């Protein structure tokens, strides 16, 4: 599912996951019309190693967001 300029939803079969769904939304910031917030929502169920896989995926997406912030000269928001 693709919504140009607003995000996407990806559901993929993966050998390592019973379930994988990645929703990415690009949301406008109401007080700054030039700013957006990138929101990733992941739903997954690993076939094995649940805690370590969860930890790894969390770190992977933290890194991806840090790279995007750096490349775009943006700041982190909580």
Image (cartoon, grey):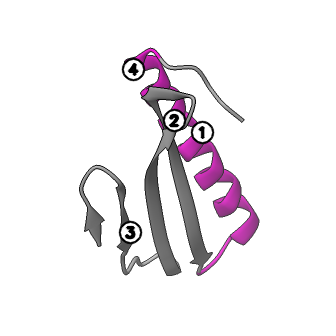
- Residue count near mark 4 (Cα–Cα under 10 Å), binned few <14, some 14–19, many ≥20: few
The outermost residue toward the top is 73
Residue 30 image point, x, y percent:
55, 37
User: Which residue is labeled 3 in the image?
Assistant: 9
Mark 4–mark 2 distance (CA, rounded to whole Å): 10 Å
Span shown in magenta: 47-73
- Tell me the SS state at disc 4: helix
Residue hosting label 4:
72
Could you tell me which secondary element the residue under label 2 belongs to?
helix
Q: CA distance from mark 4 to mark 1?
A: 15 Å
Specify whether residue 76 is painted magenta. no
Residue 5 in picture, x, y percent from top left? 28, 49
Picture residue at 45% right of the left edge, 54% below the top: 25
10 Å neighbourhood of mark 2: few (<14), some, or many (≥20)?
some
Residue 66 lies, with reference to residue 11, above or below; the image says above
Mark 4 vs mark 2, foreground winner is 4
- Numbered label tally: 4
Q: Nearer the viewer, mark 3 or mark 2?
A: 3
For marks 3 and 2 on the same chain, the one whose residue lies earlier in the sequence: 3
Q: Nearer the viewer, residue 6 or 21?
A: 6
Q: Are marks 2 and 1 in contact (CB under 8 Å)?
A: yes
Q: What residue does disc 1 label?
A: 62
Q: Which residue is mark 2?
A: 65
Of marks 4 and 1, which one's residue comes earlier in the chain?
A: 1
Between the C-alphas of marks 2 and 1, the distance is: 5 Å
- In space, the residues marked 3 and 2 are separated at their CA atoms by 17 Å
């Amino acid at each position: 599912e693709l919504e140009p300029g607003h995000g996407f939803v990806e559901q993929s079969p993966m050998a390592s996951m019973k379930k994988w769904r990645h929703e990415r939304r690009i949301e406008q910031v109401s007080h700054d019309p030039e700013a957006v917030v990138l929101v990733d929502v992941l739903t997954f169920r690993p076939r094995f190693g649940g805690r370590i896989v969860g930890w790894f995926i969390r770190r992977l997406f933290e890194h991806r967001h840090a790279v995007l912030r750096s490349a775009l000269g943006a700041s982190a928001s909580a």
